[in-house]
Image (tube, grey):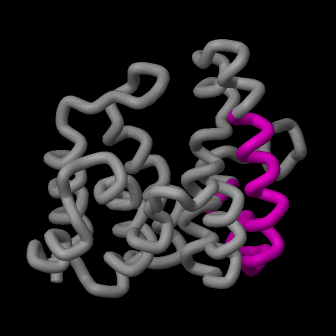
């Protein structure tokens, strides 16, 4: 099995040259998600580093397994990977049944909901994504242990706990 440092290096290679919606190197997003999950478990932190690899790069779940990523980490990555024809709201409802997958998605949502990131988006995108992420939190937050939720969100986007976003 790969160490967290090796998973980070894999994620950095996979997302090399990619930027997010606001022009920031994509690796910064996945590292922020992993940072939020690190106090919970190494498994979740590794899934945070890899959560968009299958969705946004040429990597597959099978490729991650072959590279030495732990099967339970790959399973979490697979759980949060968008599927063609599956609406986002339906995916979120499915994730609520698995507390670890829900926590992974909460960390992703928390980083994407940061005010500094939202401010860099065009107004129409900002409004649409703010509503999308708020609706997801309404489903996901009750699905996880409150203490774990607060630990993760406080590290990524504490304003969400204060009801500011």
**Residue 115 rendering spot, x and y as whole percentages:** 69, 28
Between 1 and 80, the one nearer to me in the picture: 80
Please give the range of residues in magenta. Answer: 129-153
Q: Is residue 72 above or below residue 44?
A: below
Residue at 46% over, 78% down = 41
**Residue 89 rendering spot, x and y as whole percentages:** 70, 58
**Residue 150 rendering spot, x and y as whole percentages:** 74, 64
Task: Give the image quarter of residue 49.
Answer: bottom left
State whether the magenta stretch is mostly helix, strand or loop: helix
**Residue 86 rendering spot, x and y as whole percentages:** 57, 61
Q: How many marks?
A: 0
Q: Is residue 66 left or right of residue 61?
A: left
Q: Is residue 78 above or below residue 106?
A: below
As drawn, the residue found furthest toward the front would be 85
Q: Is residue 49 left or right of residue 153?
A: left
Residue at 65% over, 35% down = 114
Between 79 and 141, the one nearer to me in the picture: 79
Quarter holding the N terminus is bottom left
Residue at 47% over, 73% down = 79
Between 117 and 158, the one nearer to me in the picture: 117
Could one spot residue 151 in this view of the protein? no
């Amino acid at each position: 099995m790969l160490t967290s440092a090796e998973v980070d290096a894999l994620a950095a290679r996979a997302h090399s040259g990619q930027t997010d919606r606001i022009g920031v190197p994509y690796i910064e997003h996945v590292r922020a998600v992993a940072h939020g999950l690190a106090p919970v478990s190494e498994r979740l932190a590794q899934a945070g580093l890899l959560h968009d690899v299958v969705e946004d790069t040429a990597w597959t779940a099978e490729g991650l397994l072959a590279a030495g990523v732990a099967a339970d980490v790959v399973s979490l990555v697979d759980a949060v990977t968008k599927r063609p024809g599956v609406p986002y709201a339906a995916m979120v409802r499915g994730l609520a049944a698995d507390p670890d997958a829900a926590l992974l998605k909460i960390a992703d949502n928390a980083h994407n909901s940061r005010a500094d990131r939202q401010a860099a988006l065009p107004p129409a995108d900002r409004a649409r994504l703010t509503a999308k992420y708020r609706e997801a939190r309404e489903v996901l937050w009750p699905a996880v242990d409150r203490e774990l939720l607060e630990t993760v969100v406080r590290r990524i986007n504490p304003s969400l706990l204060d009801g500011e976003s």
